[in-house]
Protein backbone atom coordinates (compact mmCIF):
# COMPACT_ATOMS: atom_id res chain seq x y z
CA UNK A 1 0.00 0.00 0.00
CA UNK A 2 2.93 2.36 0.61
CA UNK A 3 4.34 1.86 -2.89
CA UNK A 4 2.11 4.53 -4.39
CA UNK A 5 0.36 7.69 -3.26
CA UNK A 6 -3.36 8.09 -2.47
CA UNK A 7 -3.70 10.06 -5.70
CA UNK A 8 -2.33 7.17 -7.78
CA UNK A 9 -4.57 4.73 -5.92
CA UNK A 10 -7.62 6.88 -6.68
CA UNK A 11 -6.69 7.00 -10.37
CA UNK A 12 -6.26 3.21 -10.48
CA UNK A 13 -9.64 2.61 -8.86
CA UNK A 14 -11.28 4.99 -11.34
CA UNK A 15 -9.77 3.34 -14.43
CA UNK A 16 -11.88 1.16 -16.69
CA UNK A 17 -10.64 -2.33 -17.54
CA UNK A 18 -10.05 -1.21 -21.14
CA UNK A 19 -7.81 1.64 -19.99
CA UNK A 20 -5.80 -0.68 -17.72
CA UNK A 21 -5.30 -3.14 -20.59
CA UNK A 22 -4.11 -0.32 -22.84
CA UNK A 23 -1.56 0.90 -20.26
CA UNK A 24 -0.20 -2.64 -19.90
CA UNK A 25 -0.02 -3.26 -23.65
CA UNK A 26 3.65 -2.31 -24.03
CA UNK A 27 4.69 -4.55 -21.12
CA UNK A 28 2.75 -7.53 -22.46
CA UNK A 29 4.28 -7.03 -25.90
CA UNK A 30 7.75 -7.80 -24.55
CA UNK A 31 6.63 -11.37 -23.85
CA UNK A 32 4.81 -11.76 -27.14
CA UNK A 33 4.78 -15.30 -28.56
CA UNK A 34 7.29 -15.78 -31.38
CA UNK A 35 6.04 -17.75 -34.35
CA UNK A 36 7.20 -18.73 -37.81
CA UNK A 37 7.31 -16.04 -40.47
CA UNK A 38 3.97 -16.46 -42.23
CA UNK A 39 0.95 -14.38 -43.09
CA UNK A 40 -1.41 -17.05 -41.74
CA UNK A 41 -2.29 -16.51 -38.11
CA UNK A 42 -1.19 -19.55 -36.13
CA UNK A 43 -3.35 -20.76 -33.22
CA UNK A 44 -0.66 -19.52 -30.80
CA UNK A 45 -0.53 -16.08 -32.40
CA UNK A 46 -4.32 -15.82 -32.43
CA UNK A 47 -4.62 -16.95 -28.82
CA UNK A 48 -2.13 -14.28 -27.73
CA UNK A 49 -4.61 -11.54 -28.71
CA UNK A 50 -7.28 -10.61 -26.19
CA UNK A 51 -10.89 -11.34 -27.20
CA UNK A 52 -13.37 -8.48 -27.03
CA UNK A 53 -17.07 -9.39 -26.87
CA UNK A 54 -20.06 -7.24 -27.82
CA UNK A 55 -20.93 -6.76 -24.14
CA UNK A 56 -17.43 -5.76 -23.03
CA UNK A 57 -16.75 -2.28 -21.75
CA UNK A 58 -15.24 0.28 -24.10
CA UNK A 59 -13.34 3.35 -22.95
CA UNK A 60 -15.56 6.36 -22.39
CA UNK A 61 -13.50 8.64 -24.62
CA UNK A 62 -12.66 8.69 -28.35
CA UNK A 63 -9.80 6.54 -29.67
CA UNK A 64 -11.00 2.92 -29.68
CA UNK A 65 -11.80 1.75 -33.24
CA UNK A 66 -13.41 -1.32 -34.74
CA UNK A 67 -11.94 -2.27 -38.12
CA UNK A 68 -12.69 -4.56 -41.02
CA UNK A 69 -11.96 -5.09 -44.71
CA UNK A 70 -14.51 -5.12 -47.52
CA UNK A 71 -13.82 -7.18 -50.65
CA UNK A 72 -14.51 -5.56 -54.02
CA UNK A 73 -14.67 -8.85 -55.91
CA UNK A 74 -17.94 -8.41 -57.79
CA UNK A 75 -19.59 -11.73 -58.71
CA UNK A 76 -16.42 -13.85 -58.43
CA UNK A 77 -13.60 -14.39 -55.94
CA UNK A 78 -11.15 -15.39 -58.69
CA UNK A 79 -8.04 -13.32 -59.25
CA UNK A 80 -6.82 -10.23 -57.45
CA UNK A 81 -9.26 -7.52 -56.42
CA UNK A 82 -9.25 -4.44 -54.21
CA UNK A 83 -9.95 -4.46 -50.48
CA UNK A 84 -11.15 -1.48 -48.49
CA UNK A 85 -10.02 -1.01 -44.90
CA UNK A 86 -12.79 0.59 -42.85
CA UNK A 87 -12.35 1.95 -39.31
CA UNK A 88 -14.93 3.51 -37.00
CA UNK A 89 -14.60 4.99 -33.52
CA UNK A 90 -16.78 3.18 -30.99
CA UNK A 91 -17.37 6.35 -28.97
CA UNK A 92 -18.09 9.12 -31.49
CA UNK A 93 -18.47 7.30 -34.82
CA UNK A 94 -15.47 8.90 -36.59
CA UNK A 95 -14.65 6.95 -39.76
CA UNK A 96 -11.54 6.35 -41.85
CA UNK A 97 -11.67 4.44 -45.14
CA UNK A 98 -8.85 3.42 -47.49
CA UNK A 99 -8.78 1.06 -50.50
CA UNK A 100 -5.72 -1.13 -51.11
CA UNK A 101 -4.63 -3.44 -53.93
CA UNK A 102 -5.40 -6.63 -51.99
CA UNK A 103 -5.48 -7.94 -48.43
CA UNK A 104 -1.75 -8.71 -48.15
CA UNK A 105 -0.63 -7.65 -44.69
CA UNK A 106 1.81 -5.10 -46.15
CA UNK A 107 -1.05 -3.23 -47.82
CA UNK A 108 -3.36 -3.53 -44.81
CA UNK A 109 -0.61 -2.26 -42.52
CA UNK A 110 -0.08 0.69 -44.84
CA UNK A 111 -3.77 1.57 -44.58
CA UNK A 112 -3.69 1.30 -40.78
CA UNK A 113 -0.63 3.54 -40.58
CA UNK A 114 -2.39 6.08 -42.79
CA UNK A 115 -5.45 5.95 -40.55
CA UNK A 116 -3.46 6.53 -37.36
CA UNK A 117 -1.68 9.44 -39.07
CA UNK A 118 -4.80 11.09 -40.52
CA UNK A 119 -7.30 10.62 -37.69
CA UNK A 120 -7.08 13.97 -35.82
CA UNK A 121 -6.73 12.47 -32.34
CA UNK A 122 -4.90 9.57 -30.70
CA UNK A 123 -5.90 6.06 -31.72
CA UNK A 124 -5.70 4.08 -28.47
CA UNK A 125 -7.23 0.75 -29.51
CA UNK A 126 -8.06 -1.38 -32.54
CA UNK A 127 -10.47 -4.31 -32.65
CA UNK A 128 -10.64 -6.68 -35.63
CA UNK A 129 -12.10 -10.02 -36.63
CA UNK A 130 -9.91 -13.12 -36.96
CA UNK A 131 -8.75 -12.46 -40.53
CA UNK A 132 -5.08 -13.09 -41.24
CA UNK A 133 -4.76 -9.67 -42.86
CA UNK A 134 -4.94 -8.28 -39.30
CA UNK A 135 -3.76 -11.17 -37.11
CA UNK A 136 -0.19 -11.41 -38.33
CA UNK A 137 3.17 -10.62 -36.79
CA UNK A 138 3.75 -7.43 -38.77
CA UNK A 139 0.48 -5.74 -37.78
CA UNK A 140 0.60 -6.93 -34.16
CA UNK A 141 4.22 -5.77 -33.77
CA UNK A 142 3.36 -2.35 -35.22
CA UNK A 143 0.41 -1.97 -32.82
CA UNK A 144 2.65 -2.83 -29.88
CA UNK A 145 5.28 -0.32 -30.99
CA UNK A 146 2.58 2.35 -31.28
CA UNK A 147 1.17 1.35 -27.86
CA UNK A 148 -2.21 0.69 -29.48
CA UNK A 149 -4.38 -1.76 -27.55
CA UNK A 150 -5.12 -4.66 -29.93
CA UNK A 151 -8.12 -7.00 -29.61
CA UNK A 152 -10.08 -9.45 -31.74
CA UNK A 153 -13.67 -10.60 -31.86
CA UNK A 154 -14.83 -14.15 -31.25
CA UNK A 155 -14.87 -16.37 -34.36
CA UNK A 156 -18.27 -16.46 -36.13
CA UNK A 157 -19.79 -13.90 -33.72
CA UNK A 158 -20.72 -10.94 -35.92
CA UNK A 159 -22.44 -9.18 -33.02
CA UNK A 160 -18.97 -8.60 -31.53
CA UNK A 161 -18.33 -6.22 -34.45
CA UNK A 162 -21.84 -4.95 -35.06
CA UNK A 163 -20.73 -1.32 -35.35
CA UNK A 164 -18.19 -1.80 -38.14
CA UNK A 165 -20.45 -4.30 -39.92
CA UNK A 166 -23.09 -1.56 -40.04
CA UNK A 167 -20.54 0.98 -41.31
CA UNK A 168 -19.45 -1.44 -44.04
CA UNK A 169 -23.00 -1.41 -45.40
CA UNK A 170 -23.83 2.25 -44.82
CA UNK A 171 -20.49 3.59 -46.03
CA UNK A 172 -18.48 1.24 -48.26
CA UNK A 173 -21.37 -0.56 -49.97
CA UNK A 174 -23.60 2.52 -50.12
CA UNK A 175 -21.03 4.63 -51.95
CA UNK A 176 -18.79 1.95 -53.51
CA UNK A 177 -21.53 -0.52 -54.44
CA UNK A 178 -20.90 -4.21 -55.11
CA UNK A 179 -18.87 -3.86 -58.30
CA UNK A 180 -15.49 -5.44 -58.91
CA UNK A 181 -12.49 -3.12 -58.67
CA UNK A 182 -9.06 -4.44 -59.65
CA UNK A 183 -7.13 -1.67 -61.41
CA UNK A 184 -4.93 1.18 -60.20
CA UNK A 185 -7.30 3.72 -61.74
CA UNK A 186 -10.33 2.30 -59.92
CA UNK A 187 -8.51 2.27 -56.58
CA UNK A 188 -7.44 5.88 -57.09
CA UNK A 189 -11.04 6.91 -57.77
CA UNK A 190 -12.26 5.06 -54.67
CA UNK A 191 -9.69 6.72 -52.45
CA UNK A 192 -10.67 10.16 -53.75
CA UNK A 193 -14.28 9.21 -53.03
CA UNK A 194 -13.54 8.01 -49.48
CA UNK A 195 -11.94 11.32 -48.52
CA UNK A 196 -15.10 13.16 -49.53
CA UNK A 197 -17.41 10.63 -47.88
CA UNK A 198 -15.34 10.59 -44.68
CA UNK A 199 -15.40 14.39 -44.47
CA UNK A 200 -19.16 14.42 -45.02
CA UNK A 201 -19.80 11.83 -42.32
CA UNK A 202 -17.22 13.11 -39.83
CA UNK A 203 -17.91 16.83 -40.05
CA UNK A 204 -21.34 17.36 -41.58
CA UNK A 205 -23.53 14.43 -40.54
CA UNK A 206 -24.89 14.15 -36.98
CA UNK A 207 -24.81 10.72 -35.39
CA UNK A 208 -26.70 9.32 -32.43
CA UNK A 209 -24.89 5.99 -32.24
CA UNK A 210 -21.55 5.06 -33.86
Image (cartoon, grey):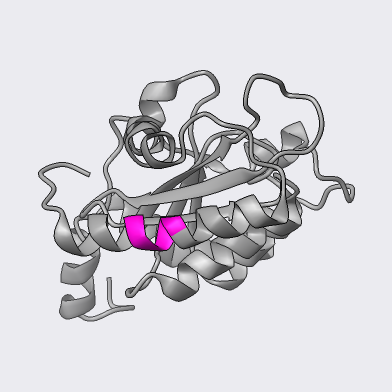
Q: Position of residue 165 (x, y in %)?
A: 39, 32
Residue sitting nearer the eye, 101 or 91: 101
Q: In the displayed image of the protein, which residue is found farthest to the right?
A: 36
Residue sitting nearer the eye, 126 or 42: 126
Residue visible at 89% across and 47% down?
36
Q: Point out the image quarter for the C terminus.
A: top left
Q: Which residues are magenta?
A: 193-197
Q: Is 80 within the magenta?
A: no
Q: Point out the image quarter for the N terminus.
A: bottom left
Horizontally, is 174 left or right of 15 in the view? Answer: right
Residue sitting nearer the eye, 169 or 193: 193
Horizontally, is 108 left or right of 23 in the view? Answer: right
Residue visible at 40% across and 63% down?
195
Q: Position of residue 137 (x, y in %)?
A: 74, 54
Q: Position of residue 88 (x, y in %)?
A: 35, 50
Q: Quadrant of residue 94?
A: bottom left
Most frequent secondary structure within the magenta stretch: helix
Q: Is residue 27 visible?
A: no
Please say if 197 is above or below 179: below
Q: Is residue 11 visible?
A: yes
Horizontally, is 119 left or right of 106 in the view? Answer: left
Q: Is 196 within the magenta?
A: yes
Amino acid sequence: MDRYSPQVRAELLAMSSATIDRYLRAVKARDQIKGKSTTKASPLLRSSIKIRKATDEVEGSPGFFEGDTVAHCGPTLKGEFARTVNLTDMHIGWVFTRTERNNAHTHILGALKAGVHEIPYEVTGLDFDNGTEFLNKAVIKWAAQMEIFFTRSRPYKKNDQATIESKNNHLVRKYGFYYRYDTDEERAVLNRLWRLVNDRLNYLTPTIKP
